Image (tube, rainbow, N blue to C red):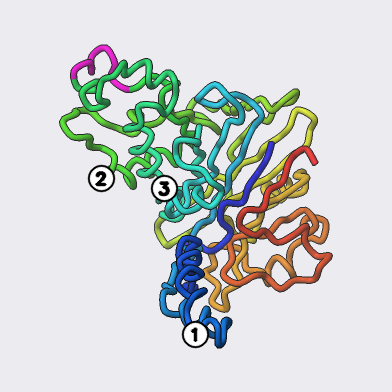
């Protein structure tokens, strides 16, 4: 299993502007300047002057806080790896572009809670895979040359929704499913001319965690000669005077016993039941804030440095911050940068 940090910055960071030129522009600069009198007299100054003239500000988005998990097993297209997004970020397009992928490369998504920085990419994933006739070979075969909206409308009694192997998987706790539907409904409950469109039109929904009958459902992903079992882990995220929002992180346990814990958004205050998961884990992907204005809904870096048990600290890879955390070299397992990858079991 490989885990890639698609984004490591706080939900509402606005990114930075940088000056830049494209490679074709550089080539053009060389052509224009190389034969000019200015270049012969002062080549460096001439190039700098031309670069400054055509440079444009480029925006570097930093609002993602999600991960890509890859398992060595066939994905929807029948070839490895199976790619699972852990949350869809504020806008998954940018994060995926950063690692050379698009929605067409994603086989499934897990949603931990319905805050916008975790579900903002859902409409993008849903609509682009729905309207892509070649999302999977099964999708192509099912459509048989028909336009998706026509297929859904004219064959709605025989095919109320695309077959399971023609759309991405959605893994979710049942208590998150209904809030998610309310949040994404306005943008996803309608397809031109097609009645009865719903979340299940776009995704094959897998409810995992504690079910209404009291049984706990997990899901197993093959990974080469081993397997990983995923299970939601409850953590309290936000508590207001009348409502609360939990964030269901993921526990990933390998058939060898190796355990990776990804709590997603949580508070530092851990009851003994939660602390046991932290102690049991071999690696923890831990969100933290570095802002001088703590929100109270994420652990602040000062909490993790001063209040977290040393044995747990050493398991933690830190992410989800404004500025890079300034911590002693030997205190945590590491500080994540966007694009960092780790392969497990270690």
Residue 3: x and y, percent? 65, 44
Q: Nearer the viewer, residue 340 or 275?
A: 340
Q: Quadrant of residue 148?
A: top left
Question: Can residue 244 be seen here?
Answer: no
Residue 239: x, y in percent? 48, 59
Crowd around label 3: few <14 · some 14–19 · many ≥20 (10 Å)? many
Per the image, label 2 sits on a secondary structure element best described as: helix
Q: Which mark is residue 145?
A: none
Q: Main secondary structure of the magenta part?
A: loop
Q: Residue furthest bottom?
A: 41
Count numbered badges in the picture. Answer: 3
Question: Which residue bears the numbered disc 1?
Answer: 38
User: For this rendering, which residue is in front, 17 or 262?
Assistant: 17
Residue for point 45% across, 72% down: 32
Q: Which residues are magenta?
A: 154-161
Is the residue 32 above or below the residue 87 in the image? below
Q: Earlier in the sequence, mark 2 or mark 3?
A: 3
The alpha-carbon separation of the residues under discs 2 and 1 comes to 59 Å
288 vs 28, nearest the viewer? 28
Q: Earlier in the sequence, mark 2 or mark 1?
A: 1
Q: Are marks 2 and 1 in contact (CB under 8 Å)?
A: no
Q: Which residue is mark 2?
A: 186
Q: Which dot, 2 or 3, sits closer to the camera?
A: 3
The percent position of residue 78, horizontal first and vertical second, equals: 54, 21
Q: Secondary structure at mark 1?
A: helix
């Amino acid at each position: 299993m490989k885990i890639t940090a698609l984004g490591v910055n706080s939900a509402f960071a606005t990114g930075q502007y940088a000056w830049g030129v494209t490679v074709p522009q550089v080539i053009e600069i060389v052509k224009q300047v190389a034969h000019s009198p200015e270049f012969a007299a002062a080549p460096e100054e001439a190039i700098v002057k031309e670069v400054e003239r055509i440079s444009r500000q480029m925006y570097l988005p930093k609002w993602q806080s999600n991960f890509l998990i890859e398992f060595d097993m066939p994905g929807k297209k029948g070839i490895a790896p199976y790619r699972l997004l852990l949350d869809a970020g504020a806008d998954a397009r940018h994060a995926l572009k950063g690692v050379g992928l698009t929605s067409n490369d994603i086989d499934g998504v897990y949603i931990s809670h319905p805050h916008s920085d975790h579900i903002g990419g859902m409409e993008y994933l849903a609509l682009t895979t729905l309207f892509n006739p070649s999302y999977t070979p099964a999708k192509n075969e099912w459509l048989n040359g028909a336009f998706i909206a026509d297929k859904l409308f004219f064959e709605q009694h025989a095919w109320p929704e695309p077959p399971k192997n023609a759309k991405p998987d959605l893994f979710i706790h049942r208590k998150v499913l209904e809030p998610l539907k309310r949040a994404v409904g306005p943008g996803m409950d309608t397809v031109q001319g097609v009645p009865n469109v719903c979340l299940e039109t776009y995704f094959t929904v897998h409810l995992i965690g504690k079910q209404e009958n009291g049984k706990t459902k997990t899901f197993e992903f093959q990974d080469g000669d081993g397997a990983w079992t995923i299970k939601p882990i409850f953590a309290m995220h936000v508590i207001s005077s009348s409502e609360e929002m939990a964030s269901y992180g993921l526990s990933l346990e390998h058939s060898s016993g190796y355990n990776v814990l990804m709590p997603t958004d949580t508070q530092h205050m851990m009851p003994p039941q939660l602390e046991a998961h932290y102690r049991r884990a071999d690696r923890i992907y831990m969100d933290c804030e570095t802002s001088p204005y703590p929100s109270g809904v994420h652990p602040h870096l000062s909490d993790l440095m001063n209040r977290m048990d040393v044995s747990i600290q050493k398991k933690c890879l830190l992410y989800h911050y404004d500025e890079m955390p300034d911590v002693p070299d030997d205190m945590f397992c590491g500080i994540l940068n966007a694009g960092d990858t780790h392969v497990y079991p270690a």
